Image (tube, grey):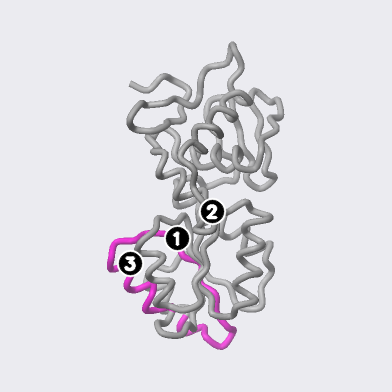
Amino acid sequence: MRVAVIEDELRLAENIAASLRETAGFAVDVAHDGEEGLYLVTTNDYDALVLDLMLPRLSGIEVLTRMRNAGIRTPVLVLSARDEMESVLGLLDRDADDYMTKPFDLRELRSRLRALIRRSQGHAVSKLVAGDIEMDTTQATVRRAGIPVSLMPMEYKMLEYLLHRQGQVVSKNELLEHLYDFNWEKFSNVIEVYIAGLRKKIEGASDPRLIHTLRGHGYMLREEEPQ
């Protein structure tokens, strides 16, 4: 999952980004003012956005208003000081999805972001299921037919994204955009390498295939062969 953090307090922004990268396994891009943040959100496809209320150059309210007017429905978690409640209520009226007041617990922020992403993809609970494969996003565990499956971090992130989009075609570029941030140099065959490794670990010789390649289009996760 790829998240944008728009926060002008440099240390706080880096702490949030480090927590999301190291503990939640998210790809994270950071902006320190509203104009830069709006540019990120309007030129990239994110799974969620962490948005500070009081930003230089362009306020959090203005960032949210402009992105919603542009048709961008990315889930937004607003950060605010305790004395900014009236502005927070205004943001919620403008289609913000959740808010937290400073100071806050980074563990709670991670949990709220996971919940926002799940709900935006139509999943109300923390377990993602396809056929006999089950991922618990809270515990970061994967089982197939009840048997634990050990995955590398990028294999886990790729499976999580495919589970969120099960039954839909996901292109190679979409995977690159949602699993990596700007700090990573994208190599042409990295997606194929991780897909191959993921298949070896979750698809035994006698198990139904789950990850299907649609040549020229991308990948689809579903138990049955796509039509």
Residue 121: give x, y in percent of width and height: 45, 47
- What segment is highlighted magenta in the picture? 60-87
**Residue 61 belongs to magenta span:** yes
The reply to whether discs 3 and 2 touch (Cβ–Cβ < 8 Å) is: no
Residue 190: give x, y in percent of width and height: 52, 38
Image-based side of 186 in relation to 215, left or right = right
Q: Earlier in the sequence, mark 3 or mark 1?
A: 3
> Of the residues shown, which amino acid type is indicated by label 2?
Trp
Res. 184 mark:
2
Number of other residues with Cα within 10 Å of mark 3, as a class: few under 14, some 14 to 19, many 20 or more: some
Res. 157 mark:
none
Q: Quadrant of residue 109?
A: bottom right
Q: Earlier in the sequence, mark 2 or mark 1?
A: 1
Q: Furthest residue to the bottom?
A: 83
**Which residue: 29% across, 61% down?**
71
> Of the residues shown, which amino acid type is indicated by label 3?
Arg
Res. 68 mark:
3
In terms of depth relative to the viewer, which is nearer, 193 or 33? Answer: 193
Q: Quadrant of residue 197?
A: top right
Q: Is residue 58 above or below residue 137?
A: below
**Which residue: 41% across, 85% down?**
57
Q: Earlier in the sequence, mark 3 or mark 2?
A: 3
> Of the residues shown, which amino acid type is indicated by label 1?
Pro
